[in-house]
Each structure stands twice: as C-alpha cells, then as structure tokens.
Image (cartoon, grey):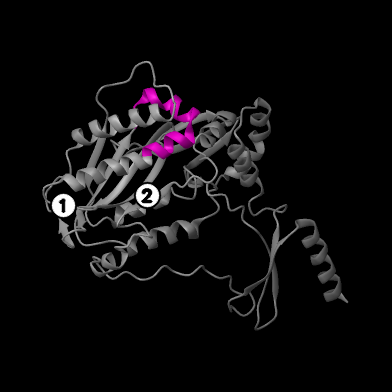
Amino acid sequence: MIRLADIVEQYGPALRQQGGLLPSQSAALSAFVRCRNEVAPKMLIGCDVCEHKIWLPHSCGNRHCPHCQAFESQRWIDQQLQKLVAGKYFMITFTLPEQFRSLAWQHQREVYELICNLAWQTVSTFAQNDKVLRGRAGAVTVLHTHNRRLDYHPHVHLVMPAAAFDNKQRLWRQKEAKYLFCHKALAKVFRAKILDGLRQAGIALPASYPADWVVDCQAVGAGDKALVYLGRYLYRGVLPEKHILSNENGQVTFRYQNGQTKQWQTRMLDGVSFLKLILKHILPKGFRRARNYGFLHPNCKLVKLVQLIKRIATPPPAPRPTVKCPCCQQPMRILRTRINAVWAHIMQQDKARETAM
C-alpha cells in the first residue's frame, strides 16, 4: 500500500516552494509526514504483570490524516446509532451550484457555516409546516467538500427521521409517505436563504447563477447504513490509502467509484497537483464537519423522550482498544506520553546498556 506520508515527503517541498498554502493546509502536511514515524513524539507503555515496556510513536491526531482517528470515526458512528428512533429515515443533500464554488473557497468558514445552518433551517421549517409532522424535527448533518473524483464540490448531507415532536401537545408524529418533502420546494427555499445569508455576510454574489438549484431527497431505510457511510469520511481524510494505486515517474494514480455506473475508474495527476487536490478539502481550524440539530442535539431538552422511542436497543460505544503485551498478552497501560523522540532514543539506549550489564 502506498502511504500518503511518503507522497507528501516526496512532493511536499515543491508544493511549499510554490507558496499559497493556508495555515491549516501547511499544518496538515507537517502532520501527515511525522505521523507515527521515527521523529514523532513517543509514549512509554508497560505491562503490570511481567513489567515489559515498549516505546510507541504517537499519531499526529490530525482529523484529515488517513492513519489516525479510526477510533474516533467508529465512536461517532456508534454515538449516532444510539440516537436512532422509530420511523423511516431520509438523506437530503443540499448542493451549491458550480458558480458559487470559487466564492465558497475564498470564504470557506462563512460559506460552510451558511450551508450547514441554512440547510437545517430549511428542513426544520418544512417539518413545522408539514400537515403530518407539524413539529420539531431532528437531523444529523455532515459537510462534504468533494465529489468522488475529489474535485471541489461543497455540499451537505442531512440524515433525518420522518418524525417530529409537537411541543405544545406533547405528541410524537411519524410520516409514512414515500417522499418526505418536495425536493423542488426545498431547493427554492434553500436558494433564497443562501442568497440572503451571503448578502448579510457582505459577500458579493456571482455575476450569474442558475434559477433552479438541486436538492436530492432519498429514503435510506432505518438510517443506520447512511450514518455508517457518512462516518467513513468524517475523520480520516477524503481518500483512503488503499485507493492510491501508484506513484511513478512523478505521477500519482488513484481510483474512485463512479456514482452512476458504480464502476471503478482511475485518475492520474502529477505529485504536486495530487497534493493540491487533497489539501483543497482541509477544513478551517475548529470547524465542525458533523453536527446534530433539533431533538437530536445533545443539549436538547427532549433527549430523554427520544431515548424512550428509540427504534432498537443498541450497544454502547466500544472503549478505546488497548495494546497487548507481546510477552504475556495482558493489556498494557500508558506510563508516559509526549516524550521527545531524541530523549526517547537516549532512554532506550540507556535501558539497553543496563540490560546488557
């Protein structure tokens, strides 16, 4: 398997020489290279049974690194599965037209906030005005900035149950219809909200843009598979390393699955362009890609009621896995962390001398 860290180490210097990197992108490049290698800070773990000790390199902890955050991704999925409620689920996708992509790139934090919040406001309004639901909805939103080819394509997915709370009458209502809301009506309201939000933020609109926008609304059954799908790209970057096929003669080739034909296709770029493509999807520092709204928000007063109407009993999130001792196979515990790599090497040498004596 070809490691992204090796590609960064090979083409990163040329990319930095070109300049123009954002602080978050530069930090991500540095994190990818040092993740779990010989220069990374070390941690000392020990076994209480046989007193065996091991030095392990720290992971970089960057949420875009393909080596890190596997546990965080699974924990997020487990937490969302805990919140599944009775009823049919839908995935609603709100997409910005192509004419707004350069604007979104220039004002990432502002535009990403607008996409997430206004998409929720749109479906929330529809749920309140719906003849069946007439109440407060709930949704999980995940922002994506890429399509399957990894081109810049900001959009937001909402996974929401066809259900709502009526706060006044204290009723829980479910909708069993084939369609949740009219996608054309959703697109019109979302378009108006985005245009108004951009104006209020002082962001100039494109010279021209389409009158009709695209919103996709699909039924996703019980919702669990949709949440697992979204969780895959939440913490571990936009391209799994298993999809990087080759790095030869200055060219990097990766594969992706065509969304329409479901066939695997390949794309080849020079090394620097490939890194630019990956860095295009580094989010601004502190920006939350995934959010919970409505009665699915952790601070919602209706959380206890939601727990009473859960669809199924799901197991609690699994604890973080532990390292087993190579000698006795017992769980090891962390003794020290964040030890400078140089000092860790010196301490290892001293320990080796003591053992030899």
Task: Specify which label sits upstream in the sequence, 1 or 2.
Answer: 1
Q: Which quadrant is home to the C terminus?
A: bottom right
Side of 207 relative to 260 (left or right): right
> Horizontally, is 234 left or right of 12 in the view?
left
Q: Looking at the picture, how far across and down is residue 290, in whole percent? A: 41, 49
Q: Residues within 10 Å of mark 2 (few under 14, many from 20)?
A: some
- In front: 348, or 170? 170
**Outermost top residue:** 207
Q: Amino acid at mark 2?
A: Leu
Mark 1 residue crowding within 10 angstroms, few (<14) / some (14–19) / many (20+): many
Residue closest to the far right: 357
Residue at point 62%, 80% (across, down)? 328
- Label 2 secondary element: helix
Q: Position of residue 332 (x, y in %)?
A: 62, 75
Indicate whether 242 appears above or below 183.
below
In the rendered structure, find residue 321 and report the number of the disc placed on it. Answer: none
Find disc 2 in the rendering and name its residue.
230
> To which residue does mark 1 refer?
133
Residue under the point 16% across and 51% down = 134
Amino acid identity at mark 1: Leu
Residue span colored magenta: 96-115
Q: Position of residue 340 (x, y in %)?
A: 76, 58
- Give yes or no for contact between labels 1 and 2 (Cβ–Cβ under 8 Å): no
On screen, 50 above or below 219? below
On the image, the x and y values in percent for residue 345 come to: 79, 61
Quarter occupied by residue 48:
bottom right
Left or right position of 318 against 23: left
